[in-house]
Image (spheres, helix red, strand yellow):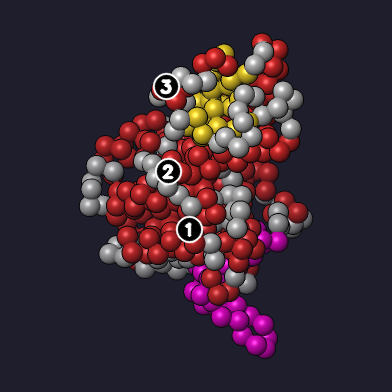
Amino acid sequence: MLKESQLALTPSPFKVVGDERIIRRFLMQYLDLMSFSPEAEQEWLHSGGFQQDLLEVTSEHSITLRTGAIQRLKMVIYISNLRISMGYFAAFPIGFLNVYKDSKFFLAAKDLMHYIAKEKIPSRETQLQEILFFAVYLMSEERPTNRAKHLRYLRRRRIGEKEHPFSVCLERLSDIAGFNLTDDDIFLFHIYQTFKRIHLGNEFNTETLQSSMLQHLPYYETNPLFQTLEKLVAETFSKIPLVFSKLNVLEIFTLFQAAILRRKNKHVIQAALVCRTYYEKDYIREVLKYHFGHKLAISTLDSSSVDLISEYEEFDLVISTELNQSSKLIGHLPAINVSAFPTGSELMEIRQFIHDHFFEQIGLDKEMIYPFEK
């Protein structure tokens, strides 16, 4: 965590040294990693009232918070109080204060500053700096109030600017995925918020990224897809510049993985089921529906039609009780033979075909995607 935070630890006495903003960020990430809850600290008496006031203030200033923001903002206040009690104060360049002092985030933070002990803040200027410190975290936790409107804005303005790094990055990510990621509302909404938060973190040396992911980093930083994404974002945003930590890349990695799996979960195989009798057809069809649900769109055909199936264009797979054991194709179509009472190995073969078919369609190495088969 110290390495990721770019801080140093003195040998004796043990003490974290560096920029105060980064030290506070480090403490928040460390306590998050240790699953510390501010409510567990008996000396911090304002926890319940702070949450209620936070919701009221953000509502008054038309600020909508993203998932988990309340707990993280509680931690920001808790750490601020802790550091101020020791005589350490946050400081930003004066230009930052001039730019943001009239923003809704600064005004909202100002309304909540009674949760920080004023008698321990030596000057009005220092108090304004502490207000800005909380305002920056509040800004990074904001999410758009109207998701549909925000998505329209992203598609018309941001993605429409072909040379903008965000647009270029999405295009390159889509090339890797094998489909247009901008069609995925969930991915588009969250990836933009991620880049926005990383940009704020770079500018202000603040970050609310959950450090619980840090313990998983050694398992995934060697993944070829992780390394590809790390290189991609570094190159794409180099002109801004935007610096991505490995934890930032891991967050993008999870959003990308989720988009692929979401696409996979919607993937449907058009299957022709060919049986000898009506009771075989009825039973096997329901067994397949039970095991594969919407992943198989099943059309049942009479065994006399088996020679005509290869002429149809809508099928991806033939499942039949009529095939010779050595037969794997009907015309140009792959085929899987099943018994009247499908066995586990036969169902596993169908499951593997569905899995392989999806990755063949998008042209992505399946070993890069959960469940990471290699």
Three-letter amino acid code at the position of disc 2? Ile
- Residue drawn 59% across and 20% down? 274
Q: Is residue 27 above or below residue 374?
A: below
Disc 1 is placed on an element classified as helix
Image quadrant occupied by the N terminus: bottom right
Mark linked to residue 312: 3
Of callouts 1 and 2, the N-terminal one: 1
Mark 1 closeness class: few <14, some 14–19, many ≥20 residues within 10 Å = some
Q: Position of residue 128 (x, y in %)?
A: 44, 60
Q: Position of residue 150 (x, y in %)?
A: 37, 36
Q: CA distance from mark 1 to mark 3?
A: 37 Å
Residue 40 visible to the viewer: yes
Q: Is residue 160 above or below residue 337?
A: below
**Start and end of the magenta stretch?**
5-34
Residue under numbered circle 2 = 362
Disc 2 is placed on an element classified as helix
Q: CA distance from mark 2 to mark 3?
A: 23 Å
Q: Is residue 126 magenta?
A: no
